[in-house]
């Protein structure tokens, strides 16, 4: 339960600086979904896209005492605020800090409620790095021979413009005679991750 944590920080990277905006989150709206492998079937070997959703107080009673503080391109918008910026959710308990989510606000992830006689709020959705893997089309990835699964995954990561916030990989136990021999322009990084993991029964 939320009450068990000594503190929760929801930070966004505003103009290069991590800034905690949790004080402006409307109670009961913060939700994290989809992180990790959510299926227990044999073929479920790659994590899903994780999302972090929350609503922000956009009235004059927020931390900036500014109406429209979280309205992108608005007259009173908070400096650095907008789609595409990084988001980090951290739970603090008993001296420990655990990052529950890190990602960035989706291109269409900001929905502003501007009606005068309703709660002035901004609905926000951010997605983690797996969303980049879903969208990224592999280009100019060269045909490989005699490579392990972890080496093949590294080749895909090297092909991507956006890197994950951290990488930990174990050495694969299988060496594949050929790799990337049938990739096409529409081949997505997530699809190649999945094929590699299913081939070696890895995760």
Image: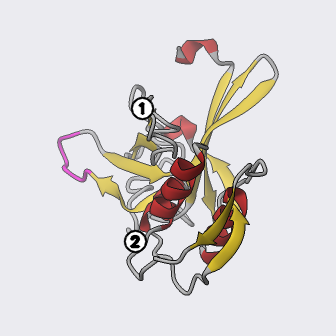
Q: Which residue is farthest bottom? A: 140
Q: Residue at x 53, y 14 (%)?
A: 1
Q: Residues within 10 Å of mark 1 (few under 14, many from 20)?
A: few
In this view, the residue in front, 15 or 1, is: 1
Q: Residues within 10 Å of mark 2 (few under 14, many from 20)?
A: few
Q: Which mark is residue 73?
A: 2
Residue 46 percent location from the top left of the image: 51, 46
Task: Give the vertical position of 25 relative to 5 (above or below).
Answer: below
Q: Tell me the element at label 2.
A: loop
Q: Residue at x 51, y 83 (%)?
A: 139
In this view, the residue in front, 182 or 117, is: 182
In this view, the residue in front, 66 or 102, is: 102
* Residue 117 part of the magenta-drawn span: yes
Which of the 4 image quarters holds residue 152? bottom right
Magenta residues, start to end: 113-118
Residue 110 percent location from the top left of the image: 36, 57
N-term mark: 2 or 1: 1
Q: Which residue is farthest right? A: 95
Q: Quadrant of the C terminus?
A: top right
Q: Is residue 104 visible?
A: no
Q: Tell me the element at label 1.
A: loop
Main SS class of the magenta portion in the image: loop
Task: Give the vertical position of 59 relative to 7 (above or below).
Answer: below
* Residue 94 part of the magenta-drawn span: no
Mark 1 lies on residue: 41
- In the displayed structure, does residue 151 sit left or right of residue 37? right
């Amino acid at each position: 339960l939320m009450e068990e944590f000594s503190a929760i920080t929801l930070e966004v990277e505003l103009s290069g600086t991590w800034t905690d905006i949790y004080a402006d989150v409307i109670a009961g709206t913060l939700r994290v979904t989809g992180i990790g492998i959510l299926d227990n079937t044999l073929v479920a070997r790659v994590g899903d896209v994780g999302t972090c959703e929350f609503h922000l107080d956009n009235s004059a009673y927020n931390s900036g005492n500014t109406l429209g503080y979280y309205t992108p391109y608005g007259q009173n918008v908070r400096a650095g605020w907008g789609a595409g910026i990084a988001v980090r959710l951290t739970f603090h308990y008993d001296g420990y800090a655990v990052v529950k989510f890190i990602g960035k606000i989706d291109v269409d992830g900001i929905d502003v409620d501007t009606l005068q006689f309703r709660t002035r709020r901004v609905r926000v959705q951010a997605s983690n790095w797996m969303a980049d893997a879903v969208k990224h089309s592999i280009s100019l990835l060269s045909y490989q021979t005699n490579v392990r699964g972890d080496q093949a995954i590294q080749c895909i990561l090297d092909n991507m413009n956006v890197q994950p916030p951290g990488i930990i990989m174990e050495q694969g136990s299988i060496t594949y005679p050929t790799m990337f021999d049938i990739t096409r322009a529409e081949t997505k990084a997530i699809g190649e991750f999945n094929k590699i993991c299913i081939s070696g029964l890895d995760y």
